[in-house]
Amino acid sequence: VRFSGKIRSAANARSAESLEPRLLLTLNVGLSSGNLLVQETSAGVDDLTIGFDSATQEYTFHDPTSILSTNINSASGNGSNTIRVPISRVSGDSIQILVGAGADKVTVANNFAPGSSRSLVIDTGAGSDIVRWNSDSTLASISVTSEVTEIAAATVKSTTTQTWNTTISSLNA
């Protein structure tokens, strides 16, 4: 019997190389037909806050527990906890937040004021999810699907329809 190759000792055969650290990207901020689309790319528990920075005219997406990704030109923060998207990059009038299964939390920050021509859709998927609504700015339309929605704003305003597929609790009582 002939053998050609390297013979390794038992000690070398049991050693393992360590891999470089990996980032788990759970939410992607992207565009679909010009509309903003925030979508879960891998299962995880999300704690997403959406806002709007009126000084820089940017949408903000922040999750302290997850790494966010984006491929939008001029957006900043890819691979971090916060993504900022210039309003000029968004030609559509809809913002969709689609987080998947899990005990997710989506907060609409008090500074979320993208203008009355924009619609917001939030669907938290299956799980024990919470939407917390802090904004009292006017949107074109609002659609929320979640197990529970906590309303902390004094009013929730839209120029057209509001659809609430959720149990609503007011934090202003």
Image (cartoon, rainbow, N blue to C red):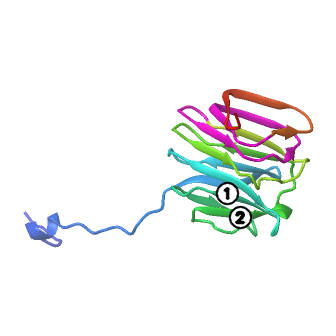
Q: Nearer the viewer, residue 137 or 8?
A: 137
Magenta stretch?
Answer: 125-154
* Picture quarter with the C terminus: top right
* Image disc number at residue 84: 2
Label 1 sits on a secondary structure element that is strand
User: In the rendering, at what x and y percent does residue 122 appear?
Assistant: 70, 39
User: In the rendering, at what x and y percent does residue 18 appear?
Assistant: 30, 68
User: In the rendering, at what x and y percent does residue 70 appear?
Assistant: 66, 61
> From the viewer's perspective, is 169 left or right of 85?
left
Give the residue displayed 85% in from the left and 39% down from the top: 157
**Residue type indicated by callout 1:** Phe
Give the residue displayed 66% in from the left and 42% down from the top: 132
Q: Are marks 1 and 2 in contact (CB under 8 Å)?
A: yes
User: Quick check: 4 above or below 97?
Assistant: below
* Image disc number at residue 171: none
User: Quick check: 109 above or below 121?
Assistant: below
* Picture quarter with the N terminus: bottom left
**Residue type indicated by callout 2:** Arg
Q: Which residue is mark 1?
A: 61
User: Quick check: 114 above or below 167?
Assistant: below
Label 2 sits on a secondary structure element that is strand
Give the residue displayed 75% in from the left and 63% down from the top: 85
Does residue 146 belong to the magenta stretch? yes
